[in-house]
Amino acid sequence: MTVAREAGVHPSTASRALSGDPVTRDGVAAGTRTRVEAAAGRLGYRRNRVGASLRTGRTGVIGVLVPRITDIVVALAYEGLDARAREDGYVTLVSGTQEDLRTRGERIEMLLDHGVDAILFSDGHLDEPPSEDAWPVPVLPFMRTAGDRRPVVALDDADGGRQVARYLLGLGHTDLGVVAGPKATSSARDRARGFTDELARAGIRLAPGRSVHCAFDVEGGKEATARLLDGAGAPTAIFAVNDVTAIGAMSAARARGFAVPQQLSVVGFNDTPLAAELPVPLTTVRSPLRAAGAAAAEAALEAVAGREPGHRVLPLELVVRGSASAPRPTT
């Protein structure tokens, strides 16, 4: 009432102008909305989400579950997700699951207890049991497949792997290795599969033991690369299915006296900000992570509104830097 009086409008007009629902808010003339918002600012008005939820049945909160909050790929996607949610007056509540299905279930219950309108999760596993949970709000995977559930938004990971294979083949590499990431992760599987499928089209198959699964972290990349380099006859090039494992691969190569790229080419995936700043800048596949997060938020908002969010796949592009070159001729 006080804001309405200060702005010189009817209380219902002030309520609609300050609504968390963009459709309701946009139904107020722009000039009137500006006047109401200015009055609210002068009076230090804060919207009562609890009261608003009693009227609308919505809290204006989206829950977000991620594998690890410290993961730069997750952080970049979350930035896009949070920014898009804010455009519609939503806030996000984020929590990490450490890739554990039981923990995810507990976090979902926690978010439901906080009254979220929807939940997005990016820690999907291929080996999850079939989805049977009837949650009271939309619970949607993004970036990864979760058992029998496709993500509402995904990267074209298989095509990214194909681009890497074509690039390394074009440089003349035929003896290749893959730091393949976690076996149960759809993004890792699809990147490695796209890579090996493209090699097969060129008549090349990976030698036995040349694809090594590992954790999506630096130590995983180091351990997998050590196995590739310490065996009989090292590959001339390695495709690491994310940038963090590629950094581990370069570290393991350096520890064993392999110069990158002169003696070992390394290609990563995602084009995280650090990739271009490494001592040997990393050739990698650029993923539109912020755009993927924004698209996930849009899908959640569609689901909250009762619409089918569908499935979107975002294209990728190879970024060539200094970590790969033609193999040295054998003497």
Image (cartoon, helix red, strand yellow):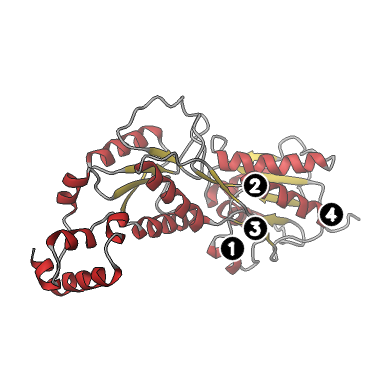
Instruction: State which tag comes first along the sequence, 3 or 4.
Output: 4
Q: Is residue 240 left or right of residue 263?
A: left
Q: Are marks 2 and 1 in contact (CB under 8 Å)?
A: no
Determine if residue 213 is in view: no
Q: Quadrant of the N terminus?
A: bottom left
Q: Amino acid at mark 3?
A: Thr
State the CA–CA distance, disc 1 to disc 4. 23 Å
Label 1, on which residue?
275
Residue on which disc 4 sits: 172
User: Distance of mark 2 from mark 1, alpha carbons?
Assistant: 21 Å
Q: Please name whichever residue, 169 or 18, is drawn nearer the observer in this view of the structure.
A: 18
Q: Find out whether the residues at labels 3 and 1 contact each other: C-beta distance under 8 Å.
A: yes
**CA–CA distance in space, label 3 to label 2:** 21 Å
Distance of mark 3 from mark 1, alpha carbons?
8 Å
| Disc 3 target residue | 284
> Few, some or many C-alpha atoms within 10 Å of disc 1 (few <14, some 14-19, many ≥20)?
many
Q: Nearer the viewer, residue 84 or 177?
A: 84
Of badges 3 and 2, nearer the viewer stands 3
